[in-house]
């Protein structure tokens, strides 16, 4: 059997449940927190520079205590971003291990409990391909794709959030038609990319 078209959402949900749904959701939450911290650091740096410029224009530069306070908060943003990336990577590795183990055990159980007629009509190479090539895709490619997809999603959301905050919401007017245009392009691209 060969699936056609885009991958069904149920396939992703099945993979998420195989490794632990809570760990899967935690990966997204921690990735979001880390990305928010990176963006927050940029805004904090801009706020710090604005305060330093206005203080120097009045002739009274920032005090050492105030500068250290700004620096500590900026460092805190950086630490949260790095810790978020580290925890996300650990959660992803744990989720991948549990998902691989669960899916392999389910596959093995189904093959071992299959009726003899299944082995009469199914070539041995096809059965071995499920345990070798397909499990390899699940173990390596799928997790890497999810990690890259998660990173891309939060980079785009972070960029949109930063632009909306910087333009005080006026960017949302242009975002709706642009979003629809990009949706049409990615729908067309995914169909051809999946077939290739």
Image: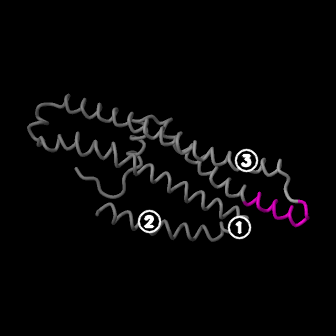
Secondary element at tag 1: loop
Disc with the residue nearer the chain's start (2 vs 3): 3
Q: Which residues are magenta?
A: 46-60
Q: Name the residue rendered at 62%, 44% in the picture.
A: 80
* Residues packed near mark 3 inside 10 Å, few (<14), some (14 to 19) or many (20 plus): some
Secondary element at tag 3: helix
Q: Which residue is mark 1?
A: 167
Secondary element at tag 2: helix
Q: Name the residue rendered at 79%, 52% in the picture.
A: 67
Q: Are marks 3 and 1 in contact (CB under 8 Å)?
A: no
Q: Which residue is mark 3?
A: 73
Q: Name the residue rendered at 60%, 61% in the picture.
A: 159
Q: Is residue 11 above or below residue 117?
A: below
Q: Name the residue rendered at 70%, 61% in the picture.
A: 165
* Residues packed near mark 2 inside 10 Å, few (<14), some (14 to 19) or many (20 plus): few
Task: Inspect the magenta stretch and tell me whether residue 163 lies in it.
Answer: no
Between residue 3 and residue 38, name the one nearer to us. Answer: 38
Q: Which residue is mark 2?
A: 186
Q: Is residue 104 left or right of residue 25?
A: left
């Amino acid at each position: 059997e060969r699936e056609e078209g885009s991958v069904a959402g149920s396939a992703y949900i099945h993979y998420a449940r195989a490794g632990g749904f809570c760990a899967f959701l935690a990966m997204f939450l921690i990735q979001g927190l880390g990305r928010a911290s990176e963006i927050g650091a940029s805004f904090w740096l801009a706020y710090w520079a604005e305060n330093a410029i206005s203080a120097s224009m009045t002739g009274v530069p920032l005090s050492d205590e105030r500068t250290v306070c700004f620096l500590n908060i900026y460092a805190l943003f950086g630490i949260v971003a790095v810790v978020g990336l580290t925890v996300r990577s650990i959660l992803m590795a744990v989720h991948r291990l549990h998902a691989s183990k669960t899916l392999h055990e389910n596959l093995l159980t189904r093959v071992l409990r299959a009726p003899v007629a299944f082995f009469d009509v199914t070539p041995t190479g096809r059965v071995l391909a499920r345990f070798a090539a397909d499990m390899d895709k699940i173990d390596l490619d799928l997790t890497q794709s999810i990690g890259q997809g998660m990173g891309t999603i939060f980079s785009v959301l972070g960029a949109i959030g930063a632009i909306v905050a910087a333009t005080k919401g006026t960017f949302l007017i242009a975002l709706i038609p642009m979003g629809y245009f990009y949706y049409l392009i990615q729908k067309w691209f995914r169909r051809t990319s999946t077939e290739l």
